[in-house]
Amino acid sequence: MDHQTVAIIPSSKLDDSEAFYNRLGFEVISDYGHYRILADGKGWHLHLTHAPGWPKNIEENPFGLYLYVDDVDAVAKRVSELIIEEGAPHTKPWGTYEFSVSDPSGLLVRVGRTID
């Protein structure tokens, strides 16, 4: 097995978080009540864990997640009204084509691809 990293994302409202990640293309593959495992069948994986009261203030959530995908525009279309930066997705100076959204717990989620 190749090495993999999977983010464990705290959420005070698991149903809201699950619905948000469903829109990005994830589906629940295992549900243990307060702990859910999601994947998109193409390589994205993440875990949601119930964390009552997290974060105390949404704008103080310091965490982020970067999702690499070939068709950035298709994912952006599914969440267009949630995109933070006007005019995104677009090319960034660091060599990616991307956009950003915020999950229900204030976690910054960037979706993009490297530019060849």
Image: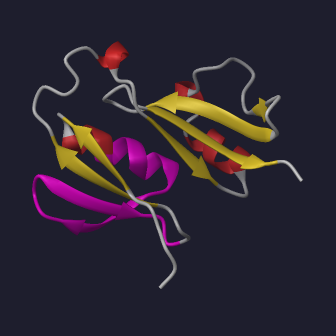
- Residue 102: give x, y in percent of width and height: 45, 28
Q: Residue farthest to the front?
A: 3
Q: Would you say residue 38 sits in the magenta stretch?
A: yes
State the image coordinates of residue 64 (x, y, percent, origin top left): 46, 35
- Looking at the image, residue 32 lies above or below residue 94: below
Q: Say if 7 sits above or below 30 in the image.
A: above
Coloring basis for residues = secondary structure
Where's residue 61, x and y in %? 34, 23
- 34 inside magenta stretch: yes
Q: Quadrant of residue 56?
A: top left
What's the residue at 57%, 43% (across, down)? 78
Residue depicted at 65% across the width and 19% down the height: 85
Q: At x 11% / y 52%, what residue is drawn?
A: 34
71 above or below 53? below
Q: Residue at x 62, y 47 (%)?
A: 75
Which residues fall within the magenta stretch?
18-41
Q: Nearer the viewer, residue 90 or 116?
A: 116
- Residue situated furthest bottom in the rendering: 1
Horizontal placement of 98 versus 47: left or right?
right
Measured as percent of width and height from the top left, residue 39 is found at 42, 64
Give the total of numbered labels.
0
In the picture provided, is 67 more to the left or to the right than 86? left
